Image: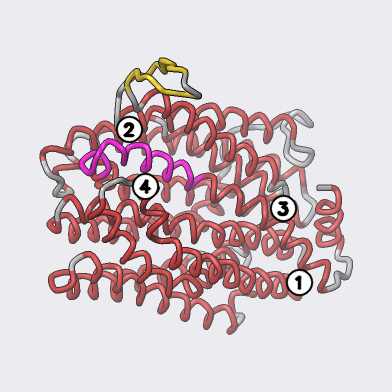
């Protein structure tokens, strides 16, 4: 931590950095960010695997609404990003007073935003499973899972904002460790809430383990409780303990200013629209998959969760790239901005290429952990091995996007994402699904991710984004 702070200060002070120091700083920021991303997806993995033991219908009820939960989470991420990118630039220019002012304004702004979005989600929770084409047997559980998720959204929003602000200051360790704690708490809560009271044999001794027996609803409640606890701890770490951003250093107004909101909207609006339209595309994929049956819905849901474990390291490197690029731009060092971008992108590609190999080899074992259903395991393994070939180029699109976010350039990358997923993925999926079933949908996804990675790399190396700044 001390060496990491020293290297970040070199960025802010305009001091020359060797290639070794640049690599060291990128790795130091990436590793805790990767841990944080993996722990966040592990919560979904845990929910899915625990619920998977209850049968395919319980799994399908979560899978049916998963893309819609990502939609609302994506909107929340965009909202938080609009503020923490500003803070990253201000800290890069060593203007800590203004950085704390933006933090105060962000707390009020994102809380109000998340309450409004949460209310919309609660209103949609009843009819949503029917709109998505889910079978009658899974609609109630799907609706309850989504309702509890949406009631917890304001806490999830604060989690995202606090984590982003801490990362912008170079503190990757605290949000990473607290998100790991959230994963552990999720396991503990799920253990008691999902399953009924049962007798467990340990070393020849029969022990009675209490349980609420709430099934899918218990999984949602377990995640909600873990989210609330960690959100409170993250806010305390940010507003009270952070050396750069703690709000006790001076008094200031919490009223959002027009300038701050305009900057936030300029960053967040393209991202938010992109997340809405992209998640709309994922929801359309769910509509394409739903007629294929419960086995296909469950296999698709489990495979998405397993694949997430492979691409989350890319998002960790992307978070590190956003911090490094944001602080370098704020310090007025475009040469260093480019070098950090280049290092981060190829580091992400290397990590996710390795993860793709692991996913291809370990697909049957991973699916075996998720569900005891042999048909779901077999179909899930086949589609995961299709997707493994897309991981290197998927990494390129993820990390390059993080680079662009770091400079505050979100409009063109958002359009690129939208064009790719709607023009390539959905059109191919609609053509291939009737003939090839779920495998056709994932072949379309693989092709589209490779295409998306290629166009992001082209834009990165044209370097026009280097002229962008808030």
For label 1, the residue is 336
Please tell me which of labels 4 and 3 falls first in the chain: 3
Q: How far apart are the two marked residues, 1 and 3, measured between alpha carbons? A: 17 Å
- Please rate how many residues cluster around mark 1, counting C-alpha atoms within 10 Å: few if below 14, some from 14 to 19, many from 20: many
Q: Closer to the camera, 201 or 406? A: 201
Q: Do the CB atoms of the residues marked 1 and 4 lie less than 8 Å apart?
A: no
Q: Closer to the camera, 44 or 323? A: 44
For label 4, the residue is 370
Please tell me which of labels 4 and 2 falls first in the chain: 2
The correct choice, above or below, for 211 with respect to 424 in the image is above
- At x 56%, y 69%, the residue is 354
Question: How far across and how far down the image is residue 435, in percent?
Answer: 14, 74
Q: How far apart are the two marked residues, 1 and 4, measured between alpha carbons? A: 43 Å
Q: Closer to the camera, 255 or 406? A: 406
The image quadrant that residue 328 belongs to is: bottom right
Which numbered disc, 2 or 3, marks the residue closer to the eye? 2
Please tell me which of labels 1 and 3 falls first in the chain: 3
Q: How far apart are the two marked residues, 4 and 3, measured between alpha carbons? A: 44 Å
Which numbered disc, 1 or 4, marks the residue closer to the eye? 4
Q: Secondary structure at mark 1?
A: helix
Task: Work out which residue is located at the far right of the displayed protein and give it.
Answer: 15
- At x 66%, y 49%, the residue is 167
Magenta-tinted stretch: 40-59
Q: Is residue 58 magenta?
A: yes
Q: Secondary structure at mark 3?
A: helix
User: Is 224 left or right of 84, judged from the image as shown?
Assistant: left
For label 3, the residue is 90
Q: How far apart are the two marked residues, 1 and 2, measured between alpha carbons? A: 44 Å
For label 2, the residue is 119
Please tell me which of labels 1 and 2 falls first in the chain: 2
């Amino acid at each position: 931590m001390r060496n990491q702070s020293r290297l970040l200060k070199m960025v802010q002070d305009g001091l020359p950095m060797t290639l070794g120091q640049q690599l060291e700083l990128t790795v130091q920021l990436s590793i805790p960010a990767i841990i944080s991303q993996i722990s966040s997806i592990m919560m979904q993995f845990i929910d899915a695997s625990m619920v998977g033991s209850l049968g395919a219908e319980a799994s399908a009820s979560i899978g049916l609404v998963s893309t819609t939960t990502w939609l609302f989470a994506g909107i929340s991420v965009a909202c938080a990003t609009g503020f923490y990118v500003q803070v990253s630039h201000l800290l890069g220019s060593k203007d800590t007073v203004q950085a704390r002012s933006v933090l105060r304004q962000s707390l009020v702004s994102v809380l109000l935003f998340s309450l409004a979005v949460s209310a919309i989600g609660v209103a949609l929770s009843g009819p949503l499973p029917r709109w998505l084409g889910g079978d009658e047997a899974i609609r109630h559980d799907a609706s309850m899972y989504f309702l509890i998720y949406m009631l917890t959204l304001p806490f999830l929003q604060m989690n995202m904002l606090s984590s982003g602000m801490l990362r912008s200051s170079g503190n990757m360790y605290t949000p990473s460790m607290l998100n790991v704690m959230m994963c552990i708490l999720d396991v503990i809560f799920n253990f008691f809430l999902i399953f009924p009271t049962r007798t467990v044999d340990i070393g020849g001794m029969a022990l009675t383990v209490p349980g609420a027996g709430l099934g899918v609803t218990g999984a949602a409640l377990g995640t909600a409780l873990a989210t609330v606890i960690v959100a409170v701890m993250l806010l305390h770490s940010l507003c009270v303990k952070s050396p750069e951003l703690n709000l006790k250093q001076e008094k200031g107004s919490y009223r959002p200013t027009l300038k701050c909101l305009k900057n936030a909207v300029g960053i967040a609006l393209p991202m938010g629209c992109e997340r809405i339209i992209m998640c709309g595309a994922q929801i359309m994929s769910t509509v394409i998959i739903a007629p294929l049956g419960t086995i296909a819905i469950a296999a698709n849901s489990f495979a998405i969760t397993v694949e997430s474990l492979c691409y989350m390291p890319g998002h960790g490197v992307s978070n590190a790239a956003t911090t490094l690029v944001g602080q370098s731009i704020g310090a007025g060092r475009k040469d260093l901005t480019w070098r950090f971008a280049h290092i981060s992108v190829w580091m992400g590609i290397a990590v996710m290429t390795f993860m793709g190999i692991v996913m291809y080899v370990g697909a049957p074992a991973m699916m075996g952990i998720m569900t005891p259903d042999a048909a779901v395991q077999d179909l899930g393994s086949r589609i995961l091995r299709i997707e493994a070939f897309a991981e290197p180029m998927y990494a390129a699109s993820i990390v390059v996007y993080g680079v662009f976010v770091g400079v505050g350039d979100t409009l063109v990358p958002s359009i690129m994402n939208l064009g790719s997923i709607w023009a390539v993925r959905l059109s191919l999926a609609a053509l291939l699904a009737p003939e090839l079933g779920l495998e056709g949908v994932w072949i379309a996804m693989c092709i589209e991710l490779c295409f998306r990675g290629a166009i992001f790399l082209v834009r990165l190396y044209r370097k026009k984004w280097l002229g962008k700044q808030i």
